[in-house]
Image (cartoon, coloured by chain):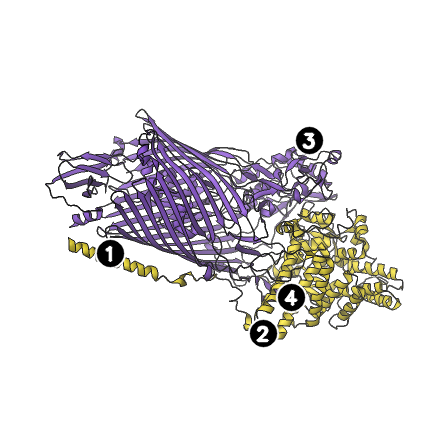
């Protein structure tokens, strides 16, 4: 009965053959690893009769004489064997060399890569795991064409990703779908626990995910239990991170020389340096070599009717800024079992815990602090900065030490899912899944007593104030507590129909329903103790430790709730593997809009033509596979803003004061637009996929055109501090992507592969405004967004030199206010009106790179393997905003040593004088080309295979490797890293004290038992 | 076999039907969500069911007490820019202020933008109140409450526009609430005359409908006296002398104000909301709420020393010109200027070697109050925006400018009443004698001098000089590069011109 039911399930058309049959048995293994394969389909050719291999890789069934057996298995090349009365037929299957036959995960299902009509890039878990990044997304850098990824060096902080450009002024966040759960971050994932990552780039691929996917979708699949016997793998790396380059700033003597020159230029009184004899390198003092350690233990068991996988991960990354660090603990249990042949249920539980030691001091503090100040006198007495920066710049080490270990910053997260799959009516499959994601983050912060500060003696107006020591007794100890709770509930129900008619028409149809609820609650409070000194010990850092004689706590709290619901359907049709049609439709509703604007219908259509299947192509021997594809799709987008903004919200935090009486007050929080509605992303994609030279060369090339209409954006309106949130404007992204791969072997022992990719994206704001043609301004006016230019481009003056003499200036355009003087930056008089005014500002470049490229090279010789991976960007600029601060006298970066001091001394660096606004307005003086190329990974590994000694201790496989990350960067930027934040859409690209991206040297071991 | 197959089919069909039911039954209420933990206009629990008026008015008071309206940009553009005060602080701190002090200001100056936006924000708050009164006919609200609310709102709008028109000249008149699109706020500039007419209209309504005073629970609210006082100043600035004199007279005869408070007490804690006070930004603090109910007006001007003398940022320091303006033995000088190396009002030694030789003494606060609140930055100190003596001198100036023996005599009487109050605290007899003259020019100069020393560091000086027409000569005498016809006004902020896409146009010379 069981056997028959199985047959029923497998067969499309049941023909029972009546003739004499003979029982055949055998075993199926992997040709490379020699491991047994479970669930391999064994069929009689041109019939539906067949079976599957069991958990030991064995099969047995009755076959008629002279029949041909077909062995097929997902991800492997099919093999055919003619049955000639062998007693046993043992088969080793070769892994599918043709990656086009691999299956990729698409929304609510999977599809052979050869049947895709959209642009999807797959990255294997193995590739992710090879880079010692604690966040798996970081490992995508340079591996996916069309993806701009900006890493952060801050321990525990994830990267910023942009796929095929910025699609909206409001939010351009990518949707992550992790084993079906919609996520906006994947911090909880263990990099070593990833099976594969699929990057869905074009609207037709994205459309099935709807609402949140407008900027692109990254589908992450975690590992399942490996087929076969119980397997235990352990991976561990230890490493050290170093800061590759410091920012060059003046030492003590140079500082004195430059500051004195500056005072002379300003006409200020000479500074009295008599007590300032130090030459402190503050960067040296706050930076360090930091350790990195990652560990992963995975245990899996696969039985006849159930599979189990347990994964444990622990990583500890110290920050290269002293005292910062991030510990990450992950655990996952995956269990799936078959109730009977038709019903499978299963689920996952992910647990995640972090323990963060936040950064205690800003990098700018170390860059800005005057080097002439000694660090400290004793444990509790530090030197304060000189009077010219005392109020604005603190002693970085005093700040660092006072803040050290004053925060308990931990989070807990559980992501779980349960699913059931029921197969019915032969070709139908119902899958129901419920998901939840709950996280609880909390911090307890302590503010310690201040140190004593020595103010070194200085002279003002001829009067010497001697050195004194001050202690600020008005500062008390205090504690702050914060608790955040995030909730997510999601359910997906789909019915899939899969049938191949006449072996020609392959149809996969899907209908589904999905709903998603997200909510959050936050609570925070602060309390100061005016009577007692709360000890510097986390045991006491609770609000309740403070006696009621002290002021009552100040507290805050808030929350958010949002929900969305969707119905969707999809039909994938392939005719004879030759003509492909993939189409989907989706109706989305979201709580953010007014009821009449809540629902939208979106859809996609993809067409493909596999030319290589055509008979006329059979003679083209050098090309194995060639497909042309075109896809179109629309997606509704509603990301990055809160609920009910179509209603007139109130700001209720201000008060009305009358005498000593305090009353509540309200005022409008923003300018509401009652007609808020969907942003709509429309895109068109054209591509070629090919494989040639005996499948050694593979590649795909795509061009795309994606337009977002009715963009939801906060508009800064003139003459008002309130912002208007409305649907406004159109943005277009166009680009081209190329992925290539070449692999081959030389002799039996040497294999190599090389995988380059590059992409180009051009972003253009087609229109912004409802007849007003407003511009959106970012980062204090350095970035601008308006029609006809890329979003958030740099907007300012263009430097043409330095004014050298007044007589030279007589022939040049100068400032309209007549304040220009020799030594000032001369700007281009763009409109040629003879004066420099705001009208002379121009587009100075783009903060987002136009070009992204990457290349990885894999070499293997016998048991040695080498991985080299590099990545770069081009076409963008970096704004050195850290240099533009003039609120106080700050330390000089090396460029200022070459400042103009008289005619002919410099045509680049203006005079040392921070009171001349002309030299601090935004211009390309503060821009650096952002192009860089970085060696991301260089790795050498050695694998012990079938080693007798190791096998005695039950080790079946052992790999040791040395790895270096970010070893070398070619860049023209002067900051710690050319990867400056682009997370602000309207004001990105500024280096305002970017955390260094460390070079990481690691030793690692992978063991399989 | 067949039977089995049929049973499968039945189960399968049932499953499909169940799914259809699930799909169809999904409840649309699932998509109804509220913003969590925040109110909107319609679900705010207005106290006593009274409607929104009071609550929105309190919001306007909060804006009056905001950083851009009465703190940094205000102090920098009115005081540091005048010849009463220098920028102060350390040489390189706040280059934006330095530009204002030295008349090198450019359209990208951040304070110029802050002042613009701060006051238009106050205009927006006022417009919102007016909109609610018009469009939210709450039956529970007594009509007089609505009228009082409208009068206060229109006062705020007039206050903001008076500051804007004096600072920028041509400004856009915005008299409605912006909804849905930006068009309501992107309007071209009106001429100063149109702006003044708009201000007068608002203030006339306010003066006619506001209460003369409020109970202690609402002390410091806008009164009829405040509306008349501001209107008198508006008339005076336009040199509408008769209207200014008559309106000032309404304040002087209202019975609400007099010169009974000693000069040195006006700026003390006890001087808050006294008989001297016509318009005062209200601020308070408690040990647990040190800043939220207050203003940073004091902190930005506090002595920039160390230890106990780390009282603030040290901006807006009295100039040598102001120092020299006082007559001998004028007790007001000591209440206005604090000297490094001198004595504080409470007898403490002020350290030598501070970054600036002089600081604003009108914002000094006693140590016991600092200790009580637990802060040396006196966020609790009210800002005296319009004092009674100001209006008495407005009266005197207007009367004298109208001229004629009777009016000049009235002007001299008013002038002498202010001097008499100051004289009460003189330690030397014969200090600050009465002015005795019938000559319009002598009296004019005496009034101008009196305004300067009576209202030193109180934000009047720059606008006074512009009204006198002597701004250029006085500023150039201080060695400042003041250009006639340009520097009387600030540039229109470039950010706003950019945002308006050219609807706003720049002032002459910038």
Kindly identify which residue carries mark 1.
Answer: B12
Distance from the alpha carbon under mark 2 to that under mark 1: 65 Å
Q: CA distance from mark 3 to mark 4?
A: 59 Å
Q: Which mark is residue A905?
A: 3
Nearer to us: label 4 or label 1? 1
Q: Is residue A594 left or right of residue B151?
A: left
The percent position of residue B215, horizontal first and vertical second, equals 65, 73
Name the residue nearer the viewer: A379 or A387: A387
Indicate the secondary structure of the residue bearing disc 2: loop
Closer to the eye: label 2 or 1: 1
Q: Chain of mark 3?
A: A
Q: Is residue B428 left or right of residue A408?
A: right
* Marks 3, 4 in one chain: no
**Lateral position of residue A895 relative to residue B267, left or right:** left
Between disc 3 and disc 1, the foreground one is 1
Callout 4: SS:
helix
Mark 2–mark 3 distance (CA, rounded to whole Å): 74 Å
Asked if A953 appears above or below B6 in the picture, the reply is: above
The image quadrant that residue B345 belongs to is bottom right
- Residue lying at the far left of the rendered structure: A20
Tag 4–tag 2 contact (CB < 8 Å): no
Disc 4 from disc 2: Cα separation: 17 Å
Location of residue B431 in the rendering, given as x and y in whole percent from the top left corner: 84, 61
| Residue behind mark 4 | B153
Seen from the viewer's position, the closer of residues A117 and B316 is A117
Colour applied to chain B: yellow
């Amino acid at each position: 009965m069981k056997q028959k039911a199985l047959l029923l399930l497998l067969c499309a058309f049941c023909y029972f053959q009546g003739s004499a049959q003979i029982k055949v048995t055998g075993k199926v293994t992997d040709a490379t690893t020699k491991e047994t394969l479970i669930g391999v389909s064994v069929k009689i050719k041109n019939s539906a009769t067949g079976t599957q291999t069991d958990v030991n890789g064995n099969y047995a069934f009755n076959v008629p004489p002279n029949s041909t057996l077909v062995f097929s298995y997902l991800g492997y090349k099919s093999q055919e064997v003619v049955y000639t009365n062998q007693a046993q037929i043992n088969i080793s299957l070769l892994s599918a060399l043709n990656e086009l036959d691999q299956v990729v995960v698409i929304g609510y299902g999977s599809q052979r890569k050869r049947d895709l009509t959209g642009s999807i890039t797959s990255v294997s878990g193995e590739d992710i795991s090879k880079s010692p990044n604690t966040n798996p997304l970081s490992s995508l850098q340079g591996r996916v064409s069309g993806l701009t990824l900006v890493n952060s060096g801050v321990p525990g902080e994830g990267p910023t990703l942009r796929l095929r450009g910025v699609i909206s002024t409001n939010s351009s966040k990518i949707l992550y779908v992790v084993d079906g759960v919609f996520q906006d971050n994947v911090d909880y994932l263990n990099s070593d626990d990833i099976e594969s990552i699929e990057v869905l780039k074009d609207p037709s691929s994205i459309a099935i995910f709807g609402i949140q996917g407008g900027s692109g979708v990254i589908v992450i699949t975690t590992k399942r239990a490996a087929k076969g016997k119980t397997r235990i793998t352990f991976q561990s790396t230890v490493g050290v991170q170093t800061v590759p380059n410091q920012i060059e700033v003046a030492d003590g003597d140079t500082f004195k020389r430059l500051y004195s020159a500056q005072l002379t230029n300003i006409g200020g009184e000479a500074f009295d340096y008599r007590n300032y004899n130090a030459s402190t390198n503050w960067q040296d003092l706050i930076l360090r070599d930091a350790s990195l350690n990652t560990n992963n233990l995975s245990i899996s068991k696969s039985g006849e009717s159930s599979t189990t996988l347990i994964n444990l991960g622990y990583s500890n990354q110290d920050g290269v800024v002293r005292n910062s660090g991030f510990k990450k603990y992950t655990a996952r249990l995956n269990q799936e079992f078959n109730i009977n042949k038709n019903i499978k249920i299963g689920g996952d539980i992910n647990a995640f815990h972090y323990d963060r030691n936040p950064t205690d001091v800003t990098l700018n503090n170390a860059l800005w602090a005057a080097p002439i100040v000694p660090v400290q006198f004793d444990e509790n007495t530090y030197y304060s900065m000189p009077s010219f920066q005392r109020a604005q710049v603190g002693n970085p080490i005093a700040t660092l030490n006072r803040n050290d270990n004053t925060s308990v910053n931990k989070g807990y997260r559980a992501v779980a899912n349960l699913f059931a799959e029921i197969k019915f009516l032969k070709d139908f499959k119902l899958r129901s899944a419920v998901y939840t994601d709950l996280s609880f983050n909390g911090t307890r912060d302590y503010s310690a007593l201040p140190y004593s500060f020595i103010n070194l003696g200085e002279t003002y107006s001829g009067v010497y104030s001697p050195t004194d020591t001050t202690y600020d007794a008005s500062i008390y100890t205090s504690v702050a507590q914060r608790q955040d709770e995030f909730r997510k509930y999601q359910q997906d129900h789909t019915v899939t129909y899969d049938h191949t008619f006449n072996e020609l028409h392959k149809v996969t149809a899907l209908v589904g329903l999905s709903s998603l609820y997200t909510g959050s609650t936050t609570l925070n409070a602060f309390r100061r103790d005016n009577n007692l000194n709360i000890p510097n010990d986390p045991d006491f850092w609770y609000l309740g430790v403070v006696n009621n004689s002290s002021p009552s706590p100040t507290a805050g709290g808030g929350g958010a709730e949002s929900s969305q619901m969707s119905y969707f359907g999809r039909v994938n049709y392939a005719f004879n593997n030759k003509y492909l049609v993939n189409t989907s439709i989706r109706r989305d509703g979201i709580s953010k809009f007014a009821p009449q604007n809540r629902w939208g219908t979106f859809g996609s259509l993809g067409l493909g033509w596999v030319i290589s299947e055509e008979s006329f192509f059979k003679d083209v021997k050098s090309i194995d596979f060639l497909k042309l594809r075109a896809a179109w799709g629309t997606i509704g987008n509603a990301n990055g803003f809160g609920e009910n903004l179509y209603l007139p919200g109130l700001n209720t935090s201000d008060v009305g004061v009358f005498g000593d009486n305090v009353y509540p007050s309200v005022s409008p929080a923003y300018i509401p637009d009652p007609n808020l509605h969907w942003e709509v992303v429309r895109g068109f994609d054209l591509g070629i996929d090919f494989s040639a030279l005996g499948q050694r060369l593979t590649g795909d090339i795509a061009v795309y055109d994606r337009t977002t209409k009715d963009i939801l954006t906060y508009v800064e309106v003139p003459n008002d501090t309130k912002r208007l949130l409305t649907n406004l404007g159109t943005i277009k992204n166009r680009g081209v992507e190329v992925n290539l791969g070449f692999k081959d072997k030389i002799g039996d022992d040497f294999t190599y592969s090389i995988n380059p990719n590059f992409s180009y994206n051009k972003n253009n704001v087609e229109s912004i405004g409802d007849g007003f043609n407003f511009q959106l301004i970012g980062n204090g006016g350095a970035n601008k967004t308006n029609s006809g230019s890329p979003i958030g481009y740099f907007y300012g003056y263009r430097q043409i030199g330095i004014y050298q003499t007044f007589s030279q200036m007589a022939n040049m355009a100068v400032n309209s206010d007549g304040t220009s003087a020799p030594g000032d930056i001369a700007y281009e008089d763009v409109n040629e009106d003879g004066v420099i005014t705001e009208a002379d500002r121009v587009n100075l470049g783009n903060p987002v790179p136009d070009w992204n490229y990457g290349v990885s090279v894999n070499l293997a010789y016998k048991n040695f393997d080498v991985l080299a991976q590099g990545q770069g960007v081009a076409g963008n600029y970096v704004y050195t905003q850290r240099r533009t601060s003039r609120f106080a006298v700050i330390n000089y970066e090396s460029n200022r040593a070459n400042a103009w001091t008289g005619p002919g001394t410099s045509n680049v660096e203006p005079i040392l004088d921070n009171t001349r606004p002309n030299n601090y307005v935004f211009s390309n003086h503060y821009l650096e080309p952002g192009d860089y190329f970085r060696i991301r990974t260089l790795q050498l590994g050695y694998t012990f295979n079938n080693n007798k000694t190791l096998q005695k201790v039950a080790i079946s496989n052992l790999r040791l490797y040395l790895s270096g990350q970010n070893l070398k960067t070619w860049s023209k930027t002067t900051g710690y890293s050319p990867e400056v934040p682009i997370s602000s859409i309207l004001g990105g690209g500024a280096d305002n004290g970017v955390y260094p991206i460390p070079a990481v040297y690691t030793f690692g071991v992978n063991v399989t038992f | 076999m067949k039977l089995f197959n049929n049973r499968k089919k039945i189960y399968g069909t049932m499953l499909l039907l169940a799914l259809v039911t699930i799909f169809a039954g999904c409840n649309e209420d699932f998509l109804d969500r509220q913003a969590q933990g925040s109110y909107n206009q319609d679900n705010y629990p207005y106290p006593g069911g009274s409607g929104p008026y009071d609550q929105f008015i309190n919001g306007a008071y909060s804006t009056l007490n905001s950083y851009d309206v009465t703190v940094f940009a205000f102090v920098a553009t009115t005081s540091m820019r005048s010849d009463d005060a220098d920028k102060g602080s350390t040489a390189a701190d706040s280059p934006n202020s330095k530009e204002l002090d030295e008349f090198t200001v450019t359209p990208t100056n951040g304070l110029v933008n802050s002042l613009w936006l701060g006051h238009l924000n106050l205009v927006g708050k006022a417009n919102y109140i007016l909109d609610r009164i018009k469009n939210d006919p709450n039956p529970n609200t007594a009509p007089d409450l609505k009228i009082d609310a409208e009068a206060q709102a229109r006062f705020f709008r007039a206050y903001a526009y008076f500051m804007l028109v004096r600072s920028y000249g041509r400004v856009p008149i915005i008299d409605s609430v912006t909804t849905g699109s930006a068009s309501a706020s992107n309007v071209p500039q009106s001429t100063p005359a149109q702006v003044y007419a708009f201000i007068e209209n608002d203030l006339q309504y306010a003066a006619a409908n506001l209460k003369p005073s409020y109970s202690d629970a609402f002390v410091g609210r806008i009164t009829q006296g405040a509306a008349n006082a501001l209107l008198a100043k508006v008339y005076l600035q336009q040199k509408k002398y008769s209207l200014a004199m008559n309106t000032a007279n309404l304040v002087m005869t209202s019975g609400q104000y007099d010169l009974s408070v000693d000069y040195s007490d006006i700026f003390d804690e006890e001087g808050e909301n006294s008989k001297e006070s016509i318009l005062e930004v209200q601020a308070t603090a408690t040990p647990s709420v040190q800043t939220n109910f207050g203003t940073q007006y004091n902190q930005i001007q506090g002595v920039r020393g160390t230890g106990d003398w780390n009282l603030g940022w040290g901006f807006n320091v009295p100039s040598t010109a102001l120092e020299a303006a006082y007559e001998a033995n004028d007790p007001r000088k000591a209440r206005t200027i604090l000297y490094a190396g001198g004595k504080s009002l409470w007898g403490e030694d002020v350290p030598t070697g501070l970054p600036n030789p002089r600081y604003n003494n009108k914002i000094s606060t006693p140590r016991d109050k600092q200790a009580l609140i637990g802060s040396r930055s006196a966020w609790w100190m009210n800002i005296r925006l319009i004092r009674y003596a100001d209006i008495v001198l407005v009266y005197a100036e207007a009367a004298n400018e109208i001229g004629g023996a009777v009016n000049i005599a009235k002007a001299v009487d008013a002038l002498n009443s202010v001097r008499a109050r100051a004289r009460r605290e003189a330690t030397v007899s014969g200090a600050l004698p009465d002015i005795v003259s019938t000559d319009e020019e002598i009296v004019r100069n005496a009034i101008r001098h009196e305004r300067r020393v009576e209202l030193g560091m109180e934000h009047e000086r720059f606008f006074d000089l512009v009204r006198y027409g002597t701004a250029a000569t006085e500023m150039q005498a201080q060695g400042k590069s003041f250009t006639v016809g340009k520097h009387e006004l600030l540039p229109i902020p470039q950010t706003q011109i950019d945002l308006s896409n050219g609807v706003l146009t720049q002032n002459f010379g910038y």
